Image (cartoon, helix red, strand yellow):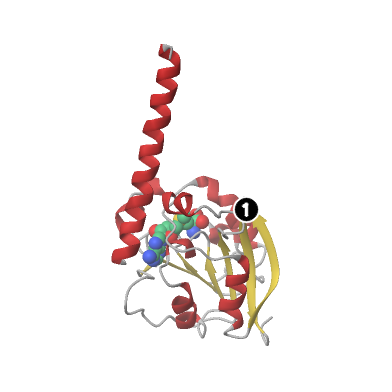
């Protein structure tokens, strides 16, 4: 092999090793049931690239409906809501005034005040047991709006773990998690292969 080829091969090997390391780290956290607070603590872990996804999510939220957002990050969603809309942010990290600091993987979850809409934007991927979480929150709101990187688009497990995603649900799995609470998807969209959907109780909206 010539020197440039060796360099390309070496770079590829280094990248693969790094990816394996990230995937292994996620698998260990998943096994031990430890949330990755260290990853999310620096604000540099939050990307402006996700704002586009939040804009799509915001379009599924009825005007003026009080919103409880989990994994609120930079709280950009608030900017997309009508001025004066009640907006309650929650996150594993204190993101500023008004944040309800809560690890959604904690053994004991707190009671949350009733809102009209619960939102998760790029958050459910980091939850060990999504059915348990939804069962806990089902009485908090009649409408759930969220994005999720479905396995229908992101099917390779190692790649999911490399992203830090600790679960693997398909679009049909999400439907059945909500169906068990008599909730149906009445609106949906996509963003970069992620399903964006709104689930409502039969009497909702
Ligand atoms: C991919 S970021 C999305 C941030 C924001 N929703 C957005 O779209 O810009 C994931 C967010 O979920 C939060 N998060 C991760 N694991 C969590 C957990 N176990 N409990 C609560 N929040 C968590 C992170 O702190 C971060 O704010």
Can you say which quadrant of the picture contains the C terminus?
A: bottom right
Q: Residue at x 61, y 74 (%)?
A: 65
In this image, 145 relative to 7: left or right? right
**Residue density around tag 1, few if under 14, some if 14–19, many if 20 or more, within 10 Å:** some
Which residue is pictured at 59% across the width and 82% down the height?
A: 142
> Within the image, what quadrant is residue 95 found in?
bottom left
Left or right: 98, with 64 as reference point: left
Q: Position of residue 135 (x, y in %)?
A: 48, 82
**Residue assigned mark 1:** 193
Q: Is residue 137 above or below residue 29?
A: below
Residue extending furthest toward the front = 1
Q: Where is residue 12 in the image (x, y as percent from the top left)?
A: 43, 30
Judge by depth and name the residue closer to the eye, 62 or 103. Answer: 103
Residue name at image x 62 percent, y 74 percent: 175
Which x, y percent locates residue 61?
A: 64, 69
Total count of labels: 1
Left or right: 170 as drawn, with respect to 97: right
Question: Can residue 85 be seen in the rendering of this structure?
Answer: yes
Label 1 near ligand 1 (CB < 8 Å): no
Residue at disc 1, secondary structure = loop
């Amino acid at each position: 092999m010539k020197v440039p080829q060796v360099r390309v091969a070496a770079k590829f090997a280094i990248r693969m090793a790094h990816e394996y390391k990230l995937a292994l780290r996620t698998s260990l956290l998943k096994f031990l049931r430890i949330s990755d607070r260290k990853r999310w603590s620096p604000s540099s872990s939050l990307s402006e690239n996700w704002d586009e996804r939040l804009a799509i999510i915001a379009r599924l939220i009825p005007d003026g409906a009080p919103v409880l957002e989990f994994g609120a990050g930079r709280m950009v969603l608030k900017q997309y809501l009508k001025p004066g809309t009640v907006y309650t942010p929650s996150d594993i990290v204190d993101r500023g005034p008004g944040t309800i600091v809560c690890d959604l993987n904690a053994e004991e979850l707190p009671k949350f005040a009733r809102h009209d809409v619960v939102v998760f934007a790029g958050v459910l991927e980091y939850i060990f047991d999504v059915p348990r979480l939804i069962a806990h929150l089902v009485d908090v709101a009649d409408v759930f709006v969220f994005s999720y990187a479905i396995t229908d688009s992101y099917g390779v497990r190692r790649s999911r773990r490399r992203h830090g995603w600790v679960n693997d649900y398909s679009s049909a799995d999400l439907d059945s998690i909500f169906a068990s609470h008599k909730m149906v998807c009445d609106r949906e969209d996509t963003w970069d292969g992620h399903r964006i959907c709104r689930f409502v109780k039969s009497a909702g909206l």
